[in-house]
Amino acid sequence: MKLREIAHSRVGDKGNLVNISVIAYREEDYPTLVERVTVERVTELFREHITRPVVRYCFPNVVALNFVLHRPPIDSVTRSLRLDAHGKSLSSLMLSLEI
């Protein structure tokens, strides 16, 4: 099953830092997020987009995880030549994760 079946995602950025939140639709799915959406799996998923280890924060009260990714400085919002400089499409990549 894909992550998108039990959760939705939001992305925010500051310079070359990207925050990707994964929020369970239902409270009972939160333990599955914690178990299967690990730092290792997210690092592998985004390996081509990041320069440093991924950091994960768990928020059980809001049934969400937050991942902090470091992009190369050339990919920061103000310097990137990419079509999606803000990285909003990264949430779609996250939700494609097989869990």
Image (cartoon, grey):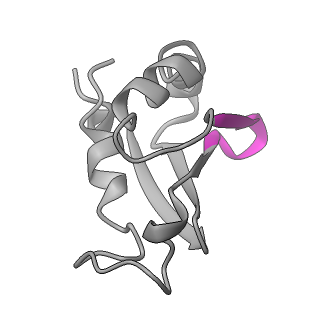
Residue 74 vs 19, above or below: the answer is below
Q: Residue at x 48, y 15 (%)?
A: 36
Front position in the image: 10 or 32: 10
Q: Residue at 46% of width from left, 30% of height from top?
A: 42
Q: Position of residue 92 (x, y in %)?
A: 27, 52
Q: Residue at x 29, y 62 (%)?
A: 89
Residue 51: which quarter of the image?
top right
Q: Quadrant of the C terminus?
A: top left
Q: Quadrant of residue 44?
A: top left
On screen, residue 98 above or below 5 = above
**Looking at this rendering, what residue extends furthest in the bottom direction?**
78
The number of discs equals 0
Q: Residue furthest front?
A: 74
Dominant secondary structure (helix, strand or loop) of the stretch shown in magenta:
strand
Where 34 falls versus 56 (above or below)? Answer: above
Apparent side of residue 31 relative to residue 48 in the rendered image (left or right)? right
Q: Is residue 62 magenta?
A: yes
The image quadrant where one finds the N terminus is: top left
State the image coordinates of residue 52 (x, y, percent, origin top left): 61, 39
- Which stretch did the figure color magenta? 55-66
Is 6 part of what is drawn in magenta?
Answer: no
From the viewer's perspective, tell me whether residue 70 is left or right of residue 87. Answer: right
In this picture, residue 51 sits left or right of residue 91: right
